[in-house]
Amino acid sequence: MKKALVLYSGGLDSRLVIRLLQDQDFQITALYFALPFGCGCSNMNCNLNLIQREPINLKILDVHKEPLLSEYLKILKSPKYGAGAGINPCKDCKIFMLKKAKEYANKHKIQIIATGEVIGQRPMSQVPSAIKTIDEELGFEILRPLCAKKLKETSFEKSGLVDRNKLLKITGRGRKEQMKLAEKYKIKYPSPGGGCLLCEKVPASRIKHLLEKNLITEKTLPLTTIGRHFFINDTWFVVARNAKESEIISTFKNHIPDDIGKPSVYMHQRPSGNTALELQEAYSTGDNEEKRNKFTIYQLSEKKSLAPKLK
Ligand code: SF4
C-alpha cells in the first residue's frame, strides 16, 4: 500500500495535493496543525465541516496544548531563520511542522510527506531560496506536487513511487490554475480564513511582549487573542470588549466579573490598589475618554516601554 501524509491547511492547495496523490493510488492521511495564533488558510471548524462532507483520514496536532505549545513558543522567541513583517517565523514554523510530520510518518510507515506549497506564492517561505533552506535544515525529502516539475526530481519520483508526469508546475501568487483544477475535480474549498496573527502588526507586538514576559501558557493562551491588553506595574490586565470576551475572562481565577455594563478584567497577579477597578470603570462606557487617557500609554502595542510607574 502506498501511503502519503499531506500537510493539510484545509485550503484549496492542500486539497488538490490530496486529489493528485489519490489519483496515484496513495492512501492519504491529512495532517492538520491547529496553531495557536492562526494558520494560513482556514480554521479548524471550517476544516472539520469540509472533512465530514468529503471523507478524508484527518489527524490533528493541537499546538495549543503542551508539550507542543512550549516547543512552538520557543521558536517564536528566537527563530533560527528570522521573522517576517510581524513576528512570523515562517521558515522555522514550516520546519517545526514538517519535523512533526516526519515523526508521524515514521511511526505509521508512511513513505511520503507532501505539501501544497507553490513556488513564489508566499514571500518568506515559498521562494526557492527559502525552500532550499527548509529542505537543508530538514535533511529529508518533501514532495511538493503542485510545483514539483519546477523543482529537482525527488527520490520518490526517481524510484517510480510517484509519477512525475502527473505532477504540476504551478508558480506564483495567482490562483487561476488551482481554481480551474478545483472545477475539474469538483473540489469544494473554503474562502481564505483569518490568516496568521503573527503577521499582523498589532497582535504580533502584543504577543511579542507577552512572550518576553513568559506569560503565555496553555492556560493563558485564550487571553492572548481577545480584549484590550495593559501592562501596569508588572501586572498584565486584559479588559473584555464584549460579552463573549467577558465570558472567557470570567473563567480565570484572577478576574473582576462583569457587572451591569462593566467589562470583565483579568489580571495575572493581584495588583495593589484599585487599578483593575479603575480600568473596568474606564472601559464601562464608550465616552470615558478622560479616564481611558490615563491608561493609554500602558496599552500593549502602544509605547508601553516608555510608560512610567502608575501611582
Ligand atoms: S504565516 Fe508563517 S508563522 Fe504563520 S502559520 Fe504560516 S508559516 Fe507559520
Image (cartoon, rainbow, N blue to C red):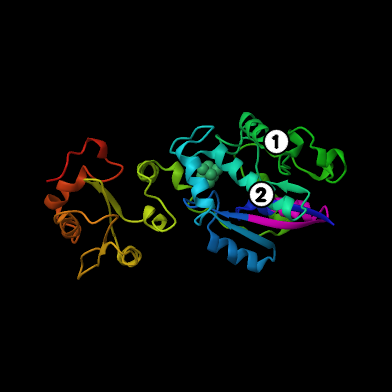
Decide whether residue 107 is among the magenta residues. Answer: no
Q: At label 2, which amino acid type do we have?
A: Ala
Front residue (pair 270, 283): 270
Q: At label 1, which amino acid type do we have?
A: Gly
Residue hosting label 2: 101
Q: Which residues are magenta?
A: 16-31
Q: Position of residue 52 (x, y in %)?
A: 64, 68
Ligand 1 within 8 Å of the CB at mark 1: no
Decide whether residue 24 is among the magenta residues. Answer: yes
Q: Position of residue 44 (x, y in %)?
A: 54, 60
Front residue (pair 78, 260): 78
Q: Residue furthest bottom?
A: 260
- Residue 40 higher or lower than 187, as above or below: above
Is residue 78 found left or right of 16 in the rendered image?
left
Is residue 297 found left or right of 268 in the rendered image?
left
Q: Residues within 10 Å of mark 2 (few under 14, many from 20)?
A: many
Q: Position of residue 49 (x, y in %)?
A: 59, 66
The local secondary structure at tag 1 comes to loop
Residue hosting label 1: 139
Q: Residue at x 66, y 37 (%)?
A: 138
Counting residues from the start of the chain, the first of labels 2 and 1 encountered is 2
